[in-house]
Amino acid sequence: MESGRRPWLKNYPPEIPAAVDYDKRPLHSFLEDSVELYGKKKALHFMGKEMTFQELFDETRSFASYLQKLGLEKGDRVSVMLPNCPQSVIAYYAILMSGGIVVQTNPLYMERELEYQLKDSEAKMIICLDILYPKAVNVKPNTSLEHIIVTGVKDYLPFPKNKLYPFIQKRQHQVLVKPEQSYDTHLWKHILDNSSGQLSPVEIDPVEDIALLQYTGGTTGSPKGVMLSHYNLVVNTQMAMTWMYKCEKGKEVVLAILPFFHVYGMTSVMNLSVMMGSKMVLVPKFEPGEVLKTIEKQKPSLFPGAPTIYIALLNHPDLKKYDLSSIEACISGSAPLPVEVQEKFESVTGGKLVEGYGLTETSPVTHSNFIWGNRISGSIGVPWPNTDAKIVSMEAGEEVPIGEIGEIVVKGPQIMKGYWNRKEDTDQVLSEEGWFRTGDMGRMDENGYFYVVDRKKDMIIAGGYNIYPREVEEVLYEHNSVQEAVIIGVPDAYRGETVKAFIVRKQGQNVTEEELNEFCRKHMAAFKVPRIYEFRDELPKTAVGKILRRTLVDEENKKLEESNLQNS
């Protein structure tokens, strides 16, 4: 790549090459490498329980063997509906090892969301927690599911936590699920105890064969399955290793707060840790006080996260009681990183915190500030090795002059193969030359640093979660008292953005905020539920009756500006 057309290259530290020769190998083969190199080293820490790389590999192979015994064939999809726990790592690599395709599924999904994803992917099996088993059973008749594999947090807890946990679970969730082994229900412990460990070899073409279906939504239409190949994921992980050149293989400890069912956590934590031989400290649920204790005790050196995570830790009343000095490097993603958060977190830890950028369709990272080099606050940084990017006009798609705003488009070996069974949608965003249209508006300065000025039209990013208005609106429209509903994102000091609903009630109806809140919580994941409701007699519309969402956004922005002026 020449630096004239790509001005960012002149800023690269000498340790980072402009291009890398990436390994064209199946993703799971790197677990085999780590066993050879670091077999006796700790691979996982989970609530007091630890596993070596050898133990992780042995259980992964046993699990893969059982999947093949159940009839898993090359290309079959398997849903993984788990929080960060040893089972999520084992299941992920076992599916790949046995020739399957992983379908990452958010454990917070309600039945309608789960059913849609299972139907669309035609998943043959699902691996879920015991408390989620009833959901899987309920949707199974309407999907292609043949087998449900059930595990529990207690399966990997040390004594006596494993004995006490069921009682804690019953108190927290008001349910105690006890599934039994049967022809279509399989218990995790039974699988590991009854697997031969013998695996039929599967030929994988890393470039062509899909490793992962990662679902992403859209402002129009239903969520789409992003097809990421083994090579896409290997490339992006090796790009991360190149970027983090001061990190040492076999020596780092990575704090795994970012969920593995999100592509950012999957790449920047799980795949990176396995490839580098790093120890992962698994955190199944983010609780600031517990995380502070974990950092002091486990001494992680790497801490990929999202702004809301860093904000919550910085605002914890007991922050000063804990030693966070082990942290050396953090890349923040999922939402814009406020400068004051960056500066304060670096002051507290002594480590580096920089902002990055990417999308599900890009495996996910395309840009980042340098961790140990020139960085610019407010910028998403520069493209990673082998990654090209430019700003083009929305109309003609031609490159605009430096400093002008247009759409960010990117090209590189981490770009998806396309959307699952959606050629038309794929063709809209991916050119024949390999350029991917992000839908994000931005600009590039003369030094090649990129800035996002407006995100994808209408998408809301709250607490690092992508929320697509149409999904929420469809639920609201199912309520008998709702005539019209429109969803927008409004600024929120903690979540970055939060969900606001504008509602027009049906004539004669007087539904309340509390009633709508209860209804929404029954039909969608909690992070999508509106936090603010505004009831109106009518909504702004075009001449043909289309609701003007942008007008509502502009009204909210004006209110915020007026409020800021009054408070200044």
Image: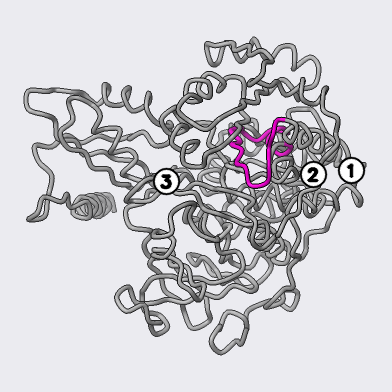
Q: Amino acid at mark 2?
A: Lys
Residue 368 is marked as none
Q: Split into 4 quadrants, where in the image is the C terminus?
A: bottom left
Which residue is identified by label 2? 279
10 Å crowding of disc 2: few (<14), some (14-19), many (20+): many
Q: Amino acid at mark 1?
A: Lys
Q: Nearer the viewer, residue 102 or 268?
A: 102
Q: Is residue 134 above or below residue 108?
A: above
Which residue is identified by label 3? 223
* Range shown magenta: 70-90
Q: Mark 1 or 3 closer to N-term?
A: 1
Q: Is residue 130 above or below residue 39?
A: above
Horizontal side of 68 relative to 393 (left or right) equals right
Secondary element at image label 3: loop
Q: Amino acid at mark 3?
A: Pro
Q: Mark 2 or 1 closer to N-term?
A: 1
Spatial CA span between label 2 and label 1: 8 Å
* Image spot of residue 215 (x, y percent): 49, 46
The extreme bottom residue here reads: 4
Residue 84: name its quadrant: top right
10 Å crowding of disc 1: few (<14), some (14-19), many (20+): some
Is there CB contact under 8 Å for labels 2 and 1? yes
Q: Mark 3 or 2 closer to N-term?
A: 3
10 Å crowding of disc 3: few (<14), some (14-19), many (20+): some
* Image spot of residue 473 (x, y percent): 28, 39
* Image spot of residue 522 (x, y percent): 37, 23
Residue 41 is marked as 1
